[in-house]
Image (tube, grey):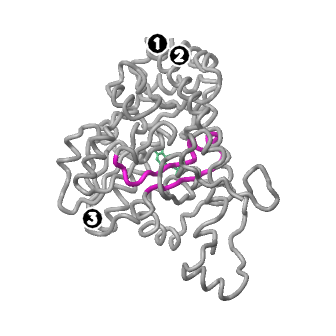
Amino acid sequence: MAEKGKTSWRAETALIHGGHQRTRHGETAEALFLTSGYRYESAAQAEARFKGEEEGYIYTRYGNPTVRVFEERMMALEGAQAAKATASGMAAVTAAFLSSLKAGDHLIAARALFGSCRYVVETVLPRFGIEVSLIDGAENGAWEKAIRPNSRALFLETPTNPRLDILDLSFIGGLAKSEKLRLIVDNVFATPFLQKPLRFGAEIVVYSATKHIDGQGRALAGIILGSEEYVEEELAPFYRNTGPALSPFNAWLMLKSLETLPIRMKAHCQRAETLARFLESQSAVKRVFYPGLASHPGRALAKKQMSLPGALLAFEMGSKRDAFRLMDNLRIIGISNNLGDAKSLIVHPATTTHSRLSEEARLEIGVSDRLLRLSAGLEHAEDLKEDLSRALSSLR
Ligand SMILES: Cc1ncc(COP(=O)(O)O)c(C=O)c1O
C-alpha cells in the first residue's frame, strides 16, 4: 500500500512519494481514479459512510483518491494539517472567504491583488454584507489602523501581482495572532517551495495551482490549506455542498507536476534573476522590479521570508507604445496573461489582468500603462536575453 505523508521527508522526496496509495497492481505511477461515484458493499455500509462512522469515499464532489494524493503532497510541502483541492485558484480564494466569513464580518485586504481576487473582495463579498477595507499592505501600520471590532480576517498576496511588492509576513502574521484574526495568504507568486506563510502566522494558504504547480500551462486547479479544525469544521461542509471540487484528471496532472517543482523553481528563479539584471542595464527600460535586485525596496524582507526571489519580474518602459512594441517584437517570449509556465510569458497588466480597475486604482498599486510583467520560463537564459535584446533594439 502506502508511502503515506511522512512529515520527516524533505520537500524533494515528499513531492515524489507523498500520499501515494498503490493499488493491488503495484503500479509505479499514481493511479488515476476517474470516477464520480463509489459503490458500497451493502446498504449498511452506505449508511455508515454517510453518518461518518466509516472512512471511505462517497462522491467525487466530496473527495476522490487521486485528488487526495495531490492534497497530501501539498500538505507535506506546505507543512499544513489539512487541505481541499479546487477546480481553479479563484474557486480556492472564493471558498476560503465564504467558508470563513459571514454577513457583518469585516475583512482587511491589501490593495495590490490579482484582478479577480480584487473583484471578489470589492464587489462580491459586500453583496453578502461582508465589510471590506482595502489598504496599502506594504505599510505595516495600515493593517493595525484598519482593525475594527467586527474584523475577522486579513487577506494578502506577496510578492504582489503584478509589481512584486513584498509584504511583511512575520509582522502581519504576528498581528493576526495577537488580534485573533484569520490571515489568509494567496501564495501563488511565491509558490509553496519558496515561501511558507503558515510559519509566519497565516491560518489559511490558497493557491492557483494553474501556475507553477502545474508549470506547463495545461490545466486549471487550486487548493486551500490550513489547520485540521478549519478544514474539517468550516471548509469541508461548504466545499461538499457548493461543489468547487477539482477534477481527478487535473489532480493527477498536478500531482505529477509536483514531482519536479523544486528543480523547476530553482531554474525559473535563475532565469528571472538573469533577465532582471539584463533589463536593469538597458537604457530603454526605466525601472525593474525583482525582489532579488539590490534596487528592490523589499529585498531584505524577501530574503527573510522567501528561499529564492521568485520567477516573476516586472519592468517599466518609457511609454505604453514602447511596451506594446517590445511585446510585439518578441519571438520566444509569448504574450499571455497566464504565468508559471515552462514557456516565458509577458503581459501588459493595465490593459489585461488589471483592466477592470479605474486608472486611479491602478496607479495606486503601481500598474501604469508603461508596466510589463514577465513570467520567466525554463528556456535557456541566454536565448531569453537575446530575445529581449532584439526586441529592445527594434525600439531605437
Ligand atoms: C495571484 C493570483 N491569485 C489567484 C489567481 C487565480 O487563479 P486561477 O486562474 O487558477 O483561477 C491568479 C491567476 O490567475 C493569480 O495570479
Left or right of 12, for residue 208 = left
Instruction: Please indicate whether residue 182 sits to the left or right of residue 392 in the image.
Output: left
323 above or below 119?
above
Q: Residues within 10 Å of mark 2 (few under 14, many from 20)?
A: many
Labels 2 and 1: the sequence-earlier one:
1
**Residue 70 x/y as whole percent:** 61, 53
Q: Which element carries disc 1, helix, strand or loop? A: loop
Q: Check disc 2 and report its element: helix, strand or loop.
A: helix
Q: Picture quarter containing residue 114? A: top left
> In the picture, residue 257 is in which quadrant?
top right
Within the image, what quadrant is residue 87 found in? bottom right
Q: Residue 309's spot in the image, x, y percent?
A: 45, 29
- Indicate which disc residue 282 carries: 1
Q: Which residue is mark 2?
A: 392
Marks 2 and 1 sit apart, C-alpha to C-alpha, by: 8 Å
- 114 within the magenta span: no
The image's mark for residue 395 is none
Q: Secondary structure at mark 3?
A: loop
Residue drawn at x 35%, y 42% is 112
What residue is disc 3 on? Answer: 105
Residue at (41% x, 51% y) in the render: 117
Q: Position of residue 266 (x, y in %)?
A: 56, 29
Question: Quick one: 163 or 334, which is closer to the camera?
Answer: 163
- Check if mark 2's residue and mark 1's residue have beta carbons within 8 Å: yes
Which of label 2 and label 1 is nearer to you? 1
Mark 1 or 3 closer to N-term? Answer: 3
Which mark sits nearer the N-terminus, 2 or 3? 3
- Image coordinates of residue 103 in percent, x first then y, are 29, 69
Badge nearest the viewer, 1 or 3: 3
Crowd tier of the residue under label 1, counting other residues whose Cα lies within 10 Å: few below 14, some 14–19, many 20 or above: few
Q: Which residues are magenta?
A: 201-226
Q: Are the residues at dot 2 and dot 3 in contact (C-beta closer than 8 Å)?
A: no
